[in-house]
Image (cartoon, grey):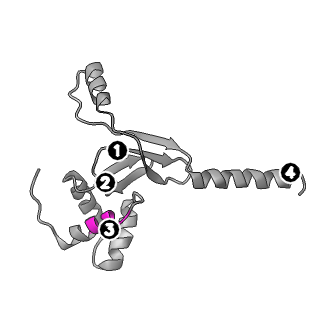
């Protein structure tokens, strides 16, 4: 791993990611950092997010339609909402035996894995139930 100079901009980006629990997008981080330093560009934030992930200081989480960033650096799973795109940690154990199973099945030397569950978050579930209920009332002329 290459030793990088810790710039002021990179430190701002790192602090922004570490200060959040919600798996922000690059744009979320850009807006937060931009509020602290109006001279920082979107490209600088994006570049620094990827450098920080490459250096293992944050985690990049690939989700349908984009990428999120996580302050947690340990191996863990995520769940993404198919309706609103929210991402959360799934409190499940990391299973080393999956690496071993994949290695045996493929001949690869497997060093890690990522698991992403997809579903509908509790907020969207409620919204969909409320919407269905409202449509039911309208159909009955309520």
Asked whether, in this view, residue 50 is left or right of residue 31, the answer is left
Task: Specify the principal SS of the magenta part.
Answer: helix
**Are the residues tagged 4 and 2 within 8 Å (C-beta)?**
no
Q: Nearer the viewer, mark 1 or mark 4?
A: 1
Q: Nearer the viewer, mark 4 or mark 2?
A: 2
Quadrant, the C terminus? bottom right
> Which residue occupies 10% across, 53% down?
2
Give the residue at x 37% y 64%.
Answer: 20
Q: Which residue is mark 1?
A: 76
Residue 129, percent from left and from top: 70, 51
112 sits left or right of 123 in the view: left
Disc 2 to disc 1: CB gap under 8 Å: yes
- Horizontal and vertical percent position of residue 77: 38, 43
Does the magenta segment cover residue 12? no
**Percent from the top left, x then y, of residue 7?**
16, 70
**Sooner in the amino-acid sequence: mark 4 or mark 3:** 3
Name the secondary structure under disc 2: loop
Instruction: Say which of 39 and 49 sits in front.
Output: 49
Label 4 crowd (10 A; few <14 / some 14-19 / many >=20):
few
Q: Earlier in the sequence, mark 1 or mark 4?
A: 1
In the rendered structure, which segment of residues is drawn in magenta? 13-20
Gap between marks 1 and 4 measured at Cα? 45 Å
Contact between labelled residues 2 and 3, with CB atoms less than 8 Å apart: no
Task: Describe residue 42's horizontal placement relative to residue 108 as left or right.
Answer: right
Identify residue for label 4: 139
The mark closer to the camera, 3 or 1, is 1
- The residue that appears at 34% across and 39% down in the rendered structure is 114
Q: State the residue position of label 2.
A: 72
For disc 3, the marked residue is 16
3 or 1: tag closer to the N-terminus: 3
Q: Quadrant of residue 108?
A: top left
The local crowd at label 2, few if under 14, some if 14 to 19, many if 20 or more residues have their Cα within 10 Å, is some
């Amino acid at each position: 791993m290459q030793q990088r100079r810790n710039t002021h901009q990179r430190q701002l980006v790192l602090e922004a990611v570490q200060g959040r629990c919600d798996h922000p997008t690059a744009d979320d981080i850009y807006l937060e950092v931009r509020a602290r330093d109006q001279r920082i560009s979107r490209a600088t934030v994006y570049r620094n997010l990827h450098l920080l992930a490459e250096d293992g200081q944050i985690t990049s989480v690939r989700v349908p339609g984009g990428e999120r960033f996580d302050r947690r650096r340990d191996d863990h799973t995520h769940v993404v909402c198919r309706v609103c795109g929210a991402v959360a940690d799934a409190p499940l154990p990391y299973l080393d035996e999956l690496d071993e199973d994949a290695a045996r099945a493929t001949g690869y030397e497997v060093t890690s894995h990522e698991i992403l569950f997809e579903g509908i978050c509790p907020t969207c579930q409620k919204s969909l139930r409320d919407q269905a209920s409202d449509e039911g009332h309208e159909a009955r002329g309520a």
